[in-house]
Amino acid sequence: MRDHASKWIILALLVLIVGLPYVLRPSANTDSASGADTASSTSGSGGTSGGGDTLIIYTPHNDSIRFEMDRGFNRWRRQQGLPPVTFDWRSGGTSDIRKQVLDQFAVLVDEHREEQGIGIDLFFGGGEYDHDILAKGIKRDDEYVPLTIPAQIPPELFKEAFPYPNIGGERLNHEQQRWTGVVLASFGIVYNCPYLQAIGVPEPTTWSDLTNPKLFSAVALADPAHSGSITAAYHAVMRRTGWTEGWAMLRRIFANARYFTASSTQVPIDVSAGEAAAGMCIDYYGRFQAGSVGHNRIGYVDPPFMTSTTADTLSIFRGAPHMETAQQFVRWMLGKPAQRLWQLKLNTSGGPEKYELRRQPIRADLFTPQEKINWTDPQIDPFESSKPLPDGMPSFFNTIAPISHALAIDIHQDLADAWRAIIHTDDPAKRQQMEALFDQMPPELSLIWPDGLDAQWQVALGDINHPRHAEAAQTLKDFVDSLATRWRSNPDQRDKDRLTWTLFFRDQYRQVAALGEQ
């Protein structure tokens, strides 16, 4: 009998041990949705706890932005006599977040339960490509179900925030307001001044400077399969230089890579630490690092007329659990108090509490001498300096990640060996032969221009009055459409192509390396 009682006591203790965490777990509206890395408002972001709502946000943004937006929004709410909001930040790379959201909504859409939502209010950060995909949504039967909803922005606020529909040809908001630009981003080069001096390389001013052979194994880069911002940086190179020329330049930059990190925030940190001489990054990461360490050690440059300025965006998810507060957050982000936070210095009225964000406000009416008095970067004015893309230049965004992997990331050692062989070849004729082999593309990725247009396509595309402008634009469109159709008709074709192209490039690089040994 005593043994029987002991067994029941042991069983009760086991139930208590196993069950206690479930009794004490947080409420469902603050649980982490499946798979996301979680950075809660009380875990590193300096969040504010209070009696108001909780905002649950997917974001690629770093701790400084999360901290200042949290404090700024709650400061504004106090002024309105409203209780503070608790921020629950769920962090990850832009592309990874987009893929996760699609996976989370897939079952709901299939079962007609999309209005239930995924327990997340907002997607804050990243460019139009990823937010466009979520705005388009998931196909069900013969139509698409959008995964985001229109923001409720009063007409007068919208007119103030968006007097221009785009900047340099890049959209500032979704036509149905399913995503809204809230701050601007450009892409450039962060560099370590002492490191460059030590290896005898001038401070970079444009993308092609990163192809310098002296930077072999000294360039920090991120993986576009995980980072939307670095995809946009590579895309800027492509759209400013062209398909064939762009991949030739990127290939040489990739060949100089020290690594390809999954996190774009790692690039400026490693450059600052001397782990790399230079790297490609989004503007505010570079400016922030330069400002923190000192411009005599760390520099940042937006390649003049060779980068792009795009909207960093904010979307509200369908079925957001705190819809009213989410809509209010979007409206607040477009007002002047929030917009000033992006550029004001510390210890200034209405400025940040802890971090200078060094971002470019999206409101054109803030780029005035009076507003810039207390800015961290008063010299910037994207509305003046942004150069429109040529009329007819298509988007290559969807091709960047798979081709970058096939051409460089998946076979980086072979790429580096081939580039090293070219660098160490003194014979001009032999080097020309090696570079021609190095730059070859598989048939599906080879853009063939009509007779005589290959040497003048940039002039023709850049001038709408040029007699061959329409022909140049149509050739580019047909080429990009052929790839899109190829991948759309067969969901597995992209992966098959990536493998086929990887084998093609690997063979080319090994031939180049072998030529170098002859």
Image (cartoon, rainbow, N blue to C red):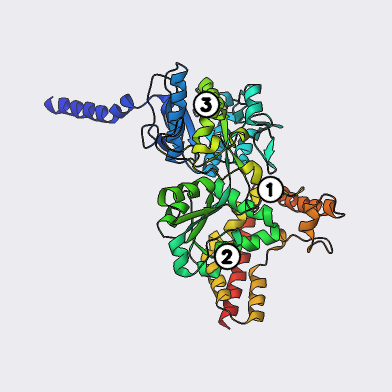
Asked if disc 3 and disc 1 are in contact, CB closer than 8 Å, the reply is no
- Of badges 3 and 1, the one in the foreground is 1
Q: Is residue 315 visible?
A: yes
Instruction: Estimate how packed mark 2 is, as few (under 14), some (14 to 19) or many (20 or more) residues with alpha carbons within 10 Å.
Output: many
Circle 1 SS class: loop
Percent position (x, y) of residue 487?
Answer: 68, 49
Q: Which residue position holds label 2?
A: 211
Q: CA distance from mark 1 to mark 2?
A: 24 Å
Percent position (x, y) of residue 411?
Answer: 54, 63
Q: Nearer the viewer, residue 226 or 172?
A: 172
Say how many tags the image has: 3
Q: Earlier in the sequence, mark 3 or mark 1?
A: 3
Q: Which residue position holds label 1?
A: 387
Q: Which residue position holds label 3?
A: 329
In the displayed structure, 217 sits above or below 295; it is below
Which quarter of the figure is the N terminus placed in?
top left
> Image check: 55 left or right of 306?
left
Q: Earlier in the sequence, mark 1 or mark 2?
A: 2
In the displayed structure, 452 sits above or below 12; it is below
Image point 44% across, 64% down: which residue? Answer: 195
Q: Nearer the viewer, residue 18 or 328?
A: 328
In the displayed structure, 205 sits above or below 31; it is below
Asked if disc 3 and disc 2 are in contact, CB closer than 8 Å, the reply is no
Q: Residue furthest right?
A: 467
For badge 3, the amino acid type reads Phe
Circle 3 SS class: helix
Asked if disc 1 and disc 2 are in contact, CB closer than 8 Å, the reply is no
Q: Nearer the viewer, residue 223 or 153?
A: 153
Q: Nearer the viewer, residue 478 or 274?
A: 274
